[in-house]
Image (tube, helix red, strand yellow):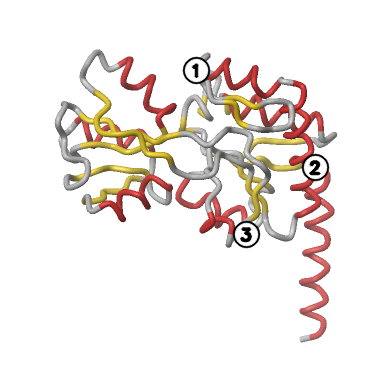
């Protein structure tokens, strides 16, 4: 038994050493413009650009790993990658399981989208992606929640009549509504949820989290994070001043 314990400890130490060589960045690859798979089959988007710059500033070699959203936290905890950078809002519930950096995307609103005006989002059937803050909100709102593994499936549920509306990040929904040619419309009020988007880490990786936290702060201080926010989300996006305070435009 002692030998088994010592062997397990040695393997854990070896894994920690290997992890220091290359930091594996876990993302969903299915939530544009935050993260998506481009035509070349590579992870792309706002978070790819931000993540690569953070790794550069932290003097870390990084590689990207795609993982489905519904298992993204369990697979971080089990060691399949070293951080989550996947449009994940900072919440108290998640913070009980993993640790977060400061936000690199300001707190923003969620929104309802339906196929027609006048939909009852408080008492109807509302789609949301599994294990998101939007799903939690719908479950507590009195509406009937239908959950889907991917964001594309939530939109499809509205289009095919399986759901009356979908609740998701407003910035994710804007291009979808604009490109729908009037097929989809915003309904109801905007819903402020979460404390912004941050990088997630195992609670045991405080040193690694600290390196990324410092890199995020440096990007806020020199304005480079603001440039990326505007590039991917447009001029109306909230940004940061030099000390990291959110500036609402």
Task: Of the two numbered discs 2 and 1 on the same chain, state the one appearing first in sequence.
Answer: 2
Q: CA distance from mark 3 to mark 2?
A: 21 Å
Tags 2 and 1 in contact by the CB under 8 Å rule?
no
The residue to which callout 1 is attached is 236
Q: CA distance from mark 2 to mark 1?
A: 30 Å
Task: Of the two numbered discs 3 and 1 on the same chain, state the one appearing first in sequence.
Answer: 3
Query: Label 2's element?
Result: helix
Query: Label 3's element?
Result: loop
Residue 48's spot in the image, x, y percent? Answer: 62, 28
> How many residues crowd around disc 3 within 10 Å: few (fewer than 14), some, or many (20 or more)?
few
The residue at the point 79 percent across, 38 percent down is 214
> How many residues crowd around disc 1 within 10 Å: few (fewer than 14), some, or many (20 or more)?
few
The residue to which callout 2 is attached is 211
Query: For this rendering, which residue is in front, 175 or 82?
Result: 175
Residue 17's spot in the image, x, y percent? Answer: 84, 54
Query: For this rendering, which residue is in front, 80 or 139?
Result: 139
Q: Picture quarter containing residue 158?
A: top left
Query: For this rendering, which residue is in front, 3 or 86?
Result: 86
Q: Can see residue 241?
A: yes
Query: Does 54 appear above or below 96?
Result: above
The residue mark sitting in front, 3 or 2, is 2
The residue to which callout 3 is attached is 78
The residue at the point 27 percent across, 26 percent down is 186
Residue 20's spot in the image, x, y percent? Answer: 82, 47
Tags 3 and 2 in contact by the CB under 8 Å rule?
no
Q: CA distance from mark 3 to mark 1?
A: 38 Å
Task: Of the two numbered discs 3 and 2 on the same chain, state the one appearing first in sequence.
Answer: 3
């Amino acid at each position: 038994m002692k030998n088994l314990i010592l062997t397990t400890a040695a393997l854990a130490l070896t894994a920690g050493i290997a992890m220091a060589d290359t930091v594996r960045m876990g993302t969903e690859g299915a939530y544009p413009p935050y993260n998506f798979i481009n035509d070349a089959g590579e992870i792309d988007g706002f978070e790819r650009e931000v993540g690569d710059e953070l790794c550069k500033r932290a003097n870390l070699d990084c590689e990207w790993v795609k993982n489905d959203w519904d298992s993204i936290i369990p697979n971080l905890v089990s060691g399949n990658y070293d951080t989550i950078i996947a449009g994940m809002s900072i919440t108290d519930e998640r913070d009980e399981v993993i640790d977060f950096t400061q936000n690199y995307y300001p707190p923003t609103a969620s929104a309802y989208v339906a196929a027609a005006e006048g939909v009852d989002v408080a008492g109807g059937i509302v789609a949301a992606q599994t294990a998101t803050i939007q799903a939690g909100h719908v479950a507590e709102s009195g509406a009937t929640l239908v959950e889907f593994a991917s964001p594309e499936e939530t939109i499809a549920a509205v289009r095919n009549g399986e759901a009356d509306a979908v609740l998701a990040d407003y910035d994710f929904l804007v291009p979808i509504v604009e490109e729908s040619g009037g097929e989809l419309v915003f309904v109801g009020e905007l819903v402020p949820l979460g404390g912004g988007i941050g990088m997630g880490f195992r609670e045991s990786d405080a040193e690694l989290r600290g390196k990324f936290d410092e890199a995020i702060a440096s990007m806020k201080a020199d304005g480079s994070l603001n440039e990326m926010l505007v590039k991917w989300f447009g001029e109306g996006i909230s940004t940061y001043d030099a000390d990291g305070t959110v500036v609402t435009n």
